[in-house]
Amino acid sequence: MISVVLKAARPRVLLLMPLLIAGCVTTAGLDPGAAPLSDDVRIALVDWARWAQNAHNIQPWRVELDPVRADRFELYVDTDRLLPETDPPARQITISLGNFLAVVEARAAQLGLRAEIDLLPDGEFDLADIRDVSVAEVTLVAATRPDTELSAAAAPDAITRPTVKYHYRRAALDDELVRRIEGYSTDLISIAVVSDPAEVDWLNKLSVEAFALEMSTEATLMETYDATRMTRRQRREDPYGLSFPGNFGPMMLRIVEISSALFPQSPEAFGRTGTSIFTKSMEEIGIYVLVTTADNSRRTQLETGMRLQALWMELQSAGYVALPNSQALQEYPEMTPLYERIHARYVSTGETIQMLLAVAEPRSWRRRHSPRLEVEDIVVTR
Ligand SMILES: Cc1cc2nc3c(=O)[nH]c(=O)nc-3n(C[C@H](O)[C@H](O)[C@H](O)COP(=O)(O)O)c2cc1C
């Protein structure tokens, strides 16, 4: 994002070198798996699940521990953290809660447990009652044998590798991996790997157009700008939302964040530099994973998130990054023509494209995760 800012800042940045180097060796917050294992297995699971993929890193989850049964908890939406402009129907928010549950499921399996996940025990919800509805009731039981379900078997340890958000080389997936990824499909969810060059080219162009539109539409630009933690201090104070640790290696990250603190960008400049970085990174995308569903119920959105997280962990374990390109799938009025264009090309009437994942090989894994809320910010006892 930041080349413009950097040019202006270069002489001052040289003076700041000792500070930058010192900043690189200190780490703010805990990485996935770094916390000591809690005696309460529910806490241990939430401690992993909070690193799940989620839209805008907004972390829309709230967990209520059952005060009587130590093997049970419920998941709710935290309505303090939604994306009303970018995601008006809270579809991506709901998918993100599915991502969270997939890590719970996979990590429980690693610990010799089976997470019985009862989705929407009180039924489907509308936006109006999103605050009070139980998204899932989770009960932990001893597993009698290893879980061979693809999604439960996915390696949650893969989340110790951050999502690399910039600077790739083109990837090729072997037939076995394609088979496994497409094997995450269910009766309602279809997962297809797209590698035909003409289709990839079409998707890359549409993704760039949609990104530019999001960054030039005032409401969505401002929502993203406000949700972006430009500096290390902002990351520490509000450890949710977008930030740059996935974009840059440690030294460059320090430079970018110090520059942003000294010379903050206007929203318009932020939108322009973001679009230019995104456009460049799309040149290196040669594969997509397209996730489509037969209906668009909340249950299907949650199940989509669960599959998405599992296949994301699978790709990360295999050394790839899977980067959601959500922009053309967003449901605010300005995006409608692009939304309709991609739906007309890939699905029949009534079906929904839930996710478009760009797959690539990172040029470097020296990246860090976006920040996360602490477990105690997420968990309450009923
Ligand atoms: C439903 C959904 C939509 C997402 N959309 C985008 C997107 O459009 N662009 C993007 O760069 N990342 C997208 N992401 C990825 C999130 O930004 C990422 O999971 C989050 O910032 C955490 O990043 P981390 O891996 O650095 O911790 C999406 C994730 C989910 C689950």
Image: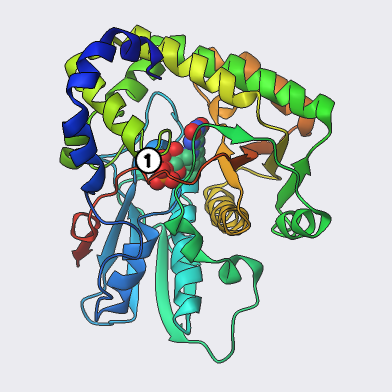
Between 198 and 285, the residue placed more toward the observer is 285
Residue 189 appears left or right of 69: right
Task: Pick whichever, 79 or 376, lies toward us.
Answer: 376
Query: Residue drawn at (54%, 51%), measured in percent from left and top?
Result: 305
Mark 1 CB near ligand 1 (8 Å cut): yes
Mark 1 residue type: Asn
Q: Is residue 275 above or below residue 148?
A: above
Task: Give the percent coordinates (x, y) of residue 121.
Answer: 44, 64
Residue at 83% of width from left, 55% of height from top? 175
Q: Is residue 108 above or below residue 86?
A: below
Residue 217 is situated, as x and y percent measured from the top left of the image, at 44, 11
Residue 294: image x %, image y %?
71, 45
The residue pinned by badge 1 equals 57
Q: Nearer the viewer, residue 231 or 126?
A: 231
Whether residue 368 is visible = yes
Q: Is residue 6 above or below residue 107?
A: above
Q: For residue 219, what is the image quadrant?
A: top left
Q: Residues within 10 Å of mark 1 (few under 14, many from 20)?
A: many
**Residue under the point 59% across and 89% down:** 145
Which residue sits furthest bottom?
144
Quadrant housing the C terminus: bottom left
Q: Is residue 338 left or right of residue 299?
A: right
Residue 372 place in picture, x, y as percent: 29, 49
Q: Residue 21, located in which quarter of the rendered image?
A: top left
Horizontally, residue 358 falls left or right of residue 241, namely: right
Q: Quadrant of residue 160?
A: bottom left
Count of marks overlaid on the render: 1
